[in-house]
Image: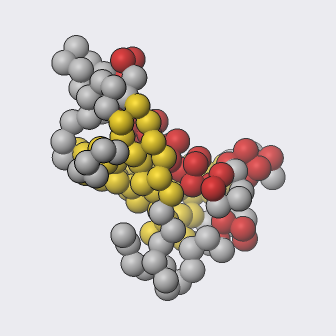
Amino acid sequence: MSAVIISTQFTVRYAEVDAMGIVHHRNYITYLEEGRSEYARQRGFPYSQFEAQGFFLLVSEVHIRHIKPAHYEQSISVNTWITEMKSRGMTFEYTVTDTQTGEILATAQTKHICITKAGQIAKMPQTWRDWHQPDDKNTP
C-alpha cells in the first residue's frame, strides 16, 4: 500500500515575499503547517478535534530543502503524507510544487511528538495511528 497524499493549494501572497518577490524561507513553515491541517481534515479527524481531546502535536524537527524559489502570485501545492507513525510520534513528508508545471520547489520533513495539555508525552489517538499502516513504507 502506498502513502495517502493530500494536496493543498496556495497562491503566494505579497506579505510572504521579500523585496525580490521571492517567498521568504520562514513562510514555508506555515505552508507545511497548513498542509498537515488539511491532511487531518481530509482524513476525517481535524486537528481541532485532536486538541479538543486534550492532545497537541509538538514539532520536534523541521527539515526543508529549497530547490527553486517560489514567487509572488505563483500557484503552489503542498503535498503531504505520513512516512512514520510511532505510538507517541509521527513524521510527515512534503513536496512544495508549482501547481501549473508540477516542478518541485522544495522538499521537507517534520517530526512530531504527541503531548497532553499538561505537557506530558502521550500515545497518539488510535484514529491517527490507523492512518499509517506498517506496509505504508513507500513514499510517492
> Who's the residue at 26% across and 29% down the image?
71
Residue 29 falls in image quadrant: top left
* Residue 120 showing in the rendered view: no
Q: Is residue 27 above or below residue 40?
A: above
Instruction: Name the residue at 18% across, 42% down.
Output: 68
Query: Quarter-wise, where is residue 10 in the image?
Result: top left
Residue found 72% across the figure and 71% down from its top: 126
Q: Is residue 53 visible?
A: yes
The coloring applied to the image is secondary structure
Residue 114 at x, y = what percent? 63, 57
Residue at (72, 68) in percent of width and height: 127
Q: Quadrant of the C terminus?
A: bottom left
> Relative to 12, does residue 116 appear above or below in the rendering?
below
In depth, the one of 108 and 87 nearer the eye is: 108
Residue 66 pos. (x, y %): 23, 44
Furthest-top residue in this view: 19
Q: Position of residue 124 (x, y in %)?
A: 67, 65
Q: Position of residue 30 (x, y in %)?
A: 46, 36
